[in-house]
Image (cartoon, rainbow, N blue to C red):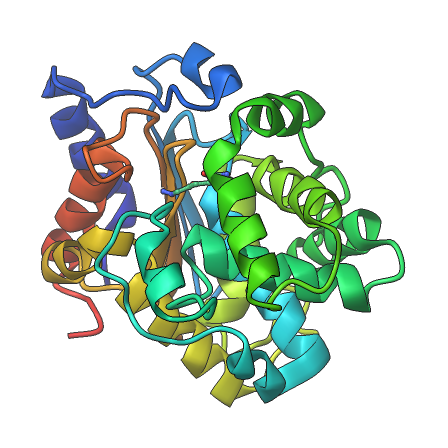
Amino acid sequence: MINYPDILHNIQLEINKVSERGQVARYIPELSKIDPHKFGMHIIDANRNEFSVGDSEEAFSIQSISKVLSLSQAIGLIGEELWTRVDVEPSGDPFNHLSLLEQENGIPRNPLINAGAIVVADILVSKLKNPKEDFLTYIQDISGDKSINFDPEVATSEKETGFRNYAAANLLKSYGNLHNDVDTVLDFYFHQCSLALNCKQLTKLFFVFMNRGKCLQNNTYLTTSQVKRINALMLTCGFYDEAGEFAFEVGLPGKSGVGGGIVALLPNNYCVATWSPGLNKKGNSKLGMLALEMLTTATKQSIF
Ligand code: DON
């Protein structure tokens, strides 16, 4: 039996000793106000036992973590057709780079970089009747938590400074890989990124990817094959140009966001979320990565 409470306690002690905590994201003004000293961590295992430490019930902006959820909803709606518009290869580039998009004629490398997520957002805008409301309902249903919502101030703040995302969307449009208006798609994208969740809620949401497509309430959202593909993308692309480092250090499929959150999972075993707002140079939570490295080392469990 793994003693999660002791392991989490030790992780928190180690994290508290670190003085260099990384930089909070500044390019979205609303995120620059977050206290870098926050740290939370929550685990839910396959038997629904839960363990937590620190600020695990304080909500933060999940940002790019939302890309896994929009991808999951889009796959549920259009299935394999999605891969005609987005590739499944790691980019080795930062999340907001555009040069590969131009070189590869408007087909984003994968759905977890910004350009790929904008194509996925375009698919949802085309397929959903009330895109923002229907996406939010999807999130609330999977997690079984009706209190989850967008943070409109964060969405507006990103819209005001989202120049690179406008560039990506316009480039996609010029290649015919964006079917709706740039503004409509980006409004959806900025809202999905603004979702505010805490670590506990995140693990309940990502339980579905740990549990072969069945959510916490035992409803099936994805086939085992779809879950395999989504988890593979998290492993190979979830941390952009640091995906190799995350696999090397942590050894789990996972996804980060510039709000400082990371969610990761060991299929059929447990799902874990961390929150520490300071980012490293690659835009991933510095102490979140350290905490997860300590977790998989202490438990001696990873997908490898
Ligand atoms: O589009 C953006 O730049 C942000 N809404 C999300 C970026 C992000 O979270 C990258 N992840 N580490």
Residue 70 seen from this side: no
In the figure, residue 109 lies in which quadrant?
A: bottom left
Residue nearest the observer in this picture, 262 or 112: 112
Residue 180: x, y in percent? 75, 58
The quarter of the rendered structure image containing the C terminus is: bottom left
Q: Is residue 17 shown left or right of residue 82?
A: left
Residue at (45, 73) in percent of width and height? 230
Q: Is residue 175 found left or right of 123 in the rendered image?
A: left
Describe residue 209's horizontal placement relative to residue 51 as left or right. Answer: right
Percent x, y of residue 299: 16, 58
Image side of residue 197 versus residue 142, left or right? left
Residue 79, picture quadrant:
bottom right
Task: Give coordinates of residue 228: x percent, y percent.
Answer: 42, 82
Q: Residue furthest right?
A: 129
Q: Count how many numbered circles sit on residues in the image.
A: 0
Query: Where's ligand 1: which quadrant?
Result: top left
Q: Nearer the viewer, residue 181 or 228?
A: 181
Where is 144 relative to 90, above or below? Answer: above
Q: Residue at x 39, y 61 (%)?
A: 101
Of residues 170 and 34, the one drawn nearer to the viewer in this rendering: 170
Is 236 situated above or below 145?
Answer: below
Q: Residue furthest front?
A: 174
Quadrant containing the N terminus in the rendered view: bottom left
For the point 34% across and 48% down, the residue is 97
* Residue located 37% across and 51% down the image: 98
The answer to which quarter of the image holds residue 128 is bottom right
Residue 60, placed above or below residue 46: above
Determine if residue 198 is in view: yes
Location of residue 174 in the rendering, given as x and y in whole percent from the top left corner = 58, 60
Task: Tell which of 150 and 290 is nearer to you.
Answer: 150
